[in-house]
């Protein structure tokens, strides 16, 4: 029961991937580890990657990292990308935060050096990659420890987890392809409907006046 218990998270991830393949496309996917433990005084990387049907356009891409002590507290932005990556110097982090991702690989991770106990809290990764119309979000809870927990023997769990992980990777890749195809078809249908509507209004006016123009904008940033 012990080794199998350690492998349960991998099985749950596999089931989650299967459910996601059947769910409707609502937004881009932001991938994070939802809970991270770090030892006080060490360096920790908070990884955040995203999947999108479109290549990153630096002139349109937008990203924010925010921090909050609890979910009820106001979010404090400490890193942003609009045309270029900017790390905001805050009283909490000073110069201990650096960008450690790679936009060419859809990676917007960052690293905290010399982790402090007051770095405990919730880190939110917001991503927008037009022409994807939805904003993606990933949330990480960072726990700063004063000492590491005792090691456990999880050899069998690692073997089982690695096997399931390979299958999971293939499922996620298939899921992304399916979602991209659905999303592009949906956006093409929306564009076709807009064209038909505009042509109908032009004909209704007898060609003497231009049809009313409609503005379609992306959702506002939640930053």
Image (cartoon, helix red, strand yellow):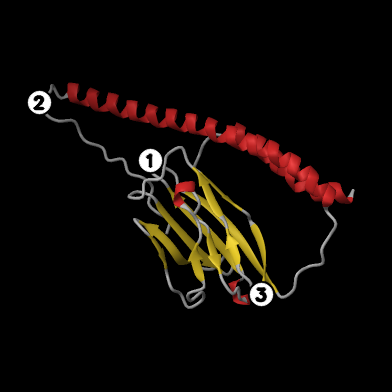
Q: Earlier in the sequence, mark 2 or mark 1?
A: 1
In the picture, which quadrant includes the C terminus?
bottom left
- Is 213 situated above or below 43? above
Instruction: Give the distance between the C-alpha atoms of the residues marked 3 and 1, in whole angstroms.
Output: 41 Å
Looking at the image, is mark 2 or mark 1 nearer the viewer? 1
Question: Dot 2 corresponds to which residue?
Answer: 208
- Is 50 situated above or below 179? below
Q: Is 144 displayed left or right of 217 in the figure?
A: right
Instruction: Give the distance between the C-alpha atoms of the residues marked 2 and 1, in whole angstroms.
Output: 34 Å
* Residue placed furthest toward the left: 208
Instruction: Write the residue at 74% across / 73% down.
Output: 147
Q: Say which element carries label 3.
A: loop
**Quarter holding residue 54:** top left
- Give the camera-side residue of 191 and 164: 164
Dot 3: few (<14), some (14–19), or many (≥20) neighbours within 10 Å?
A: some
* Disc marking residue 23: none
* Disc marking residue 40: 3
């Amino acid at each position: 029961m012990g080794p199998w218990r350690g492998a349960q998270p991998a099985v749950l991830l596999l089931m989650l991937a299967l459910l996601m393949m059947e769910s409707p496309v609502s937004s881009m996917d932001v991938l994070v580890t939802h809970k991270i433990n770090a030892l006080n005084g060490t360096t920790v990387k908070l990884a955040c990657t995203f999947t999108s049907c479109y290549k990153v356009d630096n002139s349109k891409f937008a990203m924010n990292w925010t921090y909050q002590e609890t979910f009820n507290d106001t979010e404090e932005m400490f890193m942003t990308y609009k045309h270029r990556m900017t790390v905001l110097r805050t009283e909490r982090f000073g110069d201990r935060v650096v960008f450690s991702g790679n936009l060419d690989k859809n990676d917007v991770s960052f690293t905290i050096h010399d982790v402090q106990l007051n770095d405990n809290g919730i880190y939110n990764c917001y991503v927008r990659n037009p022409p994807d119309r939805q904003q993606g979000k990933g949330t990480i809870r960072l726990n700063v420890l004063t000492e590491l927990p005792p090691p456990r023997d999880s050899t069998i769990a690692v073997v089982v987890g690695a096997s399931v992980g390979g299958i999971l990777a293939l499922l996620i890749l298939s899921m992304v392809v399916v979602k991209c195809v659905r999303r592009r078809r949906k956006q093409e249908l929306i564009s076709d409907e807009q064209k038909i509507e505009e042509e109908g209004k032009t004909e209704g006016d007898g060609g003497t006046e231009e049809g009313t123009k409609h503005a379609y904008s992306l959702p506002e940033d939640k930053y």
